[in-house]
Image (tube, rainbow, N blue to C red):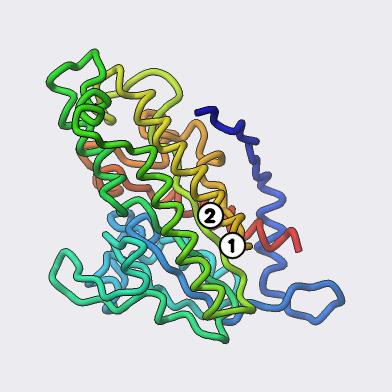
Amino acid sequence: MRWRARRARWLAPVLVALVLAGAGCGDGDDGDAPPIGSYVAIGDSYTTGTGAGPLVDDAGGTACGQVGTSYPRLVAEALGAELTDASCAGARTSDATGEQTTGSGAHWPPQLDRVSKGTDLVTVGLGYNDLGFFSQLTVGCAAAAGSDPTGTPCAERNRAQGVDPGSMADQVGDHLRDLLDQVHQRAPDARVLLVGYPQLVPPEGTCPELPLAAGDYPYVRERFAHLDDAMRAAASDTGSTFVDVYDASSGHDICAGAGAWVDGYPASTRAAAYHPFAVEHRAVADLILAEFDQD
């Protein structure tokens, strides 16, 4: 399959500063966007910020791994919005409409229930956990590496077992398309943003922090890129805004050393394994805020 060429997005510090300075004005000048009063964040552990800081001291922090430095909290603070953080670690798109049982055994209500007709902004950060997509390409492929460290054991195993992460990515896109439609139905006047995922795999080279077999790096990278395309299409098809974290995180993959936005394996003290550092949450918040500057 030919992958669509991506256009790199560069966020100048001046642009971000202007967004932050103007987001809370609400002075009624002609042409100003309506203020964001109510904001609901739907998502998984890439939204909660699990491992990237201290848990917030409430039910969400205890049950779902929400931290105070996650991008929803940074966005809400910058916009002066009232945040309802519905995100929960381990969530799938089905947990937006059904009750989720967390890793600790707690019961988390359907995330979509927090969205109402009066909601002004909804961000959706789901997809990785559907169909085991994320764990298949990280933990699963890393586990296969020992059988052939220089070859492509993960790709070969998946083919032998009939596992097609490309098809899985398309199915995740369908799940998101259905969910985004439901968000729009519940909050017809809300701005709805689908937040993508950052790059995990470098375009070339290997590193100990991403313990894949050398030949599986391109395979895993291509599958994650496929999901990004599927997410972009789901946003376009539903009239939602796609927040392009994949392009923005170029050069900040797990193997980028001090420039990495995502932790590797084993996990450091700054994030959970294969999960974003606080710096990635700040970058995602900037990307979301930049969307408001385009009004």
Residue extending farthest to the right is 30
The residue under the point 66% across, 58% down is 291
Give amino acid for label 1: Thr
Q: Quadrant of residue 59?
A: bottom left
Pick the quarter of the image with the C terminus: bottom right
Residue extending farthest to the top is 150
Q: Please, what secondary structure does the residue beneath circle 2 have?
A: helix
At which x and y percent is residue 14?
71, 49
Foreground residue, 32 or 237? 237
Foreground residue, 277 or 96? 96
Q: Please, what secondary structure does the residue beneath circle 1 have?
A: loop
The residue under the point 25% across, 40% down is 136
Give amino acid for label 2: Ala
State yes or no: discs 2 and 1 in contact (Cβ < 8 Å): yes
Q: Residues within 10 Å of mark 1 (few under 14, many from 20)?
A: some
The residue under the point 50% across, 28% down is 1
Foreground residue, 171 or 132? 171
Q: Which residue is mark 2?
A: 234
At which x and y percent is residue 256?
41, 29
At which x and y percent is residue 148?
17, 16
Distance between the Cα atoms at labels 2 and 1? 6 Å
At which x and y percent is residue 257?
38, 29
| 239, above or below 170, in the image | below
Q: Which residue is mark 1?
A: 238
Q: Residues within 10 Å of mark 2 (few under 14, many from 20)?
A: many
**In this picture, residue 125 sits left or right of residue 121:** left
Q: Quadrant of residue 155?
A: top left
| 82, above or below 229, in the image | below
**In this picture, residue 31 sits left or right of residue 118:** right
Q: Quadrant of residue 154?
A: top left
Q: What label sits on residue 210 in the rendered view?
A: none
The residue under the point 50% across, 56% down is 195
